[in-house]
């Protein structure tokens, strides 16, 4: 017959055996259910974020770079409804393209991957009309000066060359052409006023011969009153024998 103390120990062992087994099973089960899963990478969606340059000359072929994401080999690009023939995929976020000649205004850019996915950037490119070059660039149309020989009002070859060089001032501007005749200090006031007028009128006639409208021109004389050089020598007198022409816009 078992001793009382032994019976008590045996009872405890038998009573707690199912609980211990269940605990062990739960721990083993928990260990089996722990699984390490690699996180999925971000989903790349096709999109267009910008074009450089985004300002181009209307009517001109232009090389450009398209920025975005999800670009694949074989991608197609359109500007509005015009296909872009030259497209190179630099990487998934950069395309090198050649824009076709565009009309002035804003244009959308659309890309399409081989799987059919599309993305559009509205008003991606602005085509600007190229302004015509200013024919008077580099010319001082407000102060054209020619010189005359002593006591002469003839427009000689050097003076004609200067007027020819500045002809764009007379033909591209539409404002008044003011011609001022000047003289050196020698001679009477009345004589120099008359000589200055003959010089201004000679320039006016020359320009008329170059198809400049007479009604746009005003010829006046200042005689010796406004010398360019106030010295009293040959160099000063030569500088003061002149006509000054200015053309307003």
Image (spheres, rainbow, N blue to C red):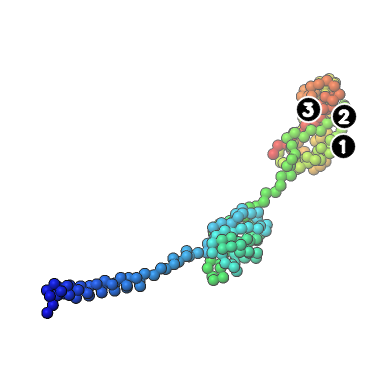
Q: Position of residue 215 (x, y in %)?
A: 75, 38
Tags 1 and 3 touching, CB below 8 Å: no
Q: Quadrant of residue 218?
A: top right
Seen as rendered, the residue at the extreme bottom is: 1
Q: Position of residue 146 (x, y in %)?
A: 81, 33
Q: Which mark is residue 170?
A: none
Q: Looking at this view, is 108 or 198 the one in front?
A: 108
Q: Looking at this view, is 223 or 42 the one in front?
A: 42
Q: Residue at x 66, y 57 (%)?
A: 62
The residue singled out by tag 2 in the image is 149
Position of 86 with respect to 197 (left or right) is: left
Q: Looking at this view, is 218 or 105 the one in front?
A: 105
The kind of secondary structure element at disc 1 is helix
Q: CA distance from mark 3 to mark 2?
A: 17 Å
The residue singled out by tag 3 in the image is 221
The quadrant the N terminus occupies is: bottom left
Q: Position of residue 90 (x, y in %)?
A: 61, 62
Could one spot residue 129 in this view of the protein? Answer: yes
Q: Quadrant of residue 222?
A: top right
Q: Residues within 10 Å of mark 3 (few under 14, many from 20)?
A: many
Q: Residues within 10 Å of mark 2 (few under 14, many from 20)?
A: few
Q: Residue at x 35, y 72 (%)?
A: 32
The residue singled out by tag 1 in the image is 157
The kind of secondary structure element at disc 3 is strand
The quadrant the C terminus occupies is: top right
Q: Residue at x 71, y 41 (%)?
A: 174
Q: CA distance from mark 1 to mark 3?
A: 22 Å
Could one spot residue 197 in this view of the protein? Answer: no
Which of the two marks, 3 or 2, is nearer to us in this view? Answer: 2
Q: CA distance from mark 2 to mark 1?
A: 11 Å
């Amino acid at each position: 017959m078992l001793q009382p103390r032994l019976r008590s120990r045996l009872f405890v062992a038998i009573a707690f055996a199912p609980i211990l087994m269940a605990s062990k099973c739960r721990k083993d089960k928990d260990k089996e259910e722990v699984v390490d899963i690699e996180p999925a990478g971000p989903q790349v969606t096709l999109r267009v974020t910008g074009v450089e340059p985004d300002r181009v000359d209307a009517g001109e072929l232009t090389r450009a770079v398209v920025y975005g994401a999800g670009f694949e080999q074989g991608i197609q690009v359109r500007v509005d409804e015009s296909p872009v023939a030259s497209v190179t995929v630099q990487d998934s976020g950069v395309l090198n393209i050649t824009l076709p000649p565009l009309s002035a205004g804003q244009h959308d850019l659309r890309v399409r991957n081989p799987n059919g996915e599309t993305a559009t950037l509205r008003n991606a490119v602005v085509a600007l009309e190229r302004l015509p070059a200013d024919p008077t660039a580099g010319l001082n149309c407000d102060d054209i000066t020619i010189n005359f020989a002593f006591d002469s009002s003839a427009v000689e070859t050097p003076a004609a060359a200067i007027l020819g060089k500045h002809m764009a001032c007379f033909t591209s501007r539409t404002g008044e052409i003011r011609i001022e005749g000047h003289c050196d200090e020698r001679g009477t006031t009345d004589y120099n006023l008359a000589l200055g007028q003959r010089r201004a009128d000679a320039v006016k006639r020359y320009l008329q011969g170059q198809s400049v409208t007479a009604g746009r021109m005003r010829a006046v004389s200042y005689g010796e009153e406004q010398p360019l050089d106030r010295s009293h020598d040959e160099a000063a007198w030569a500088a003061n024998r002149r006509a000054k022409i200015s053309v307003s816009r």
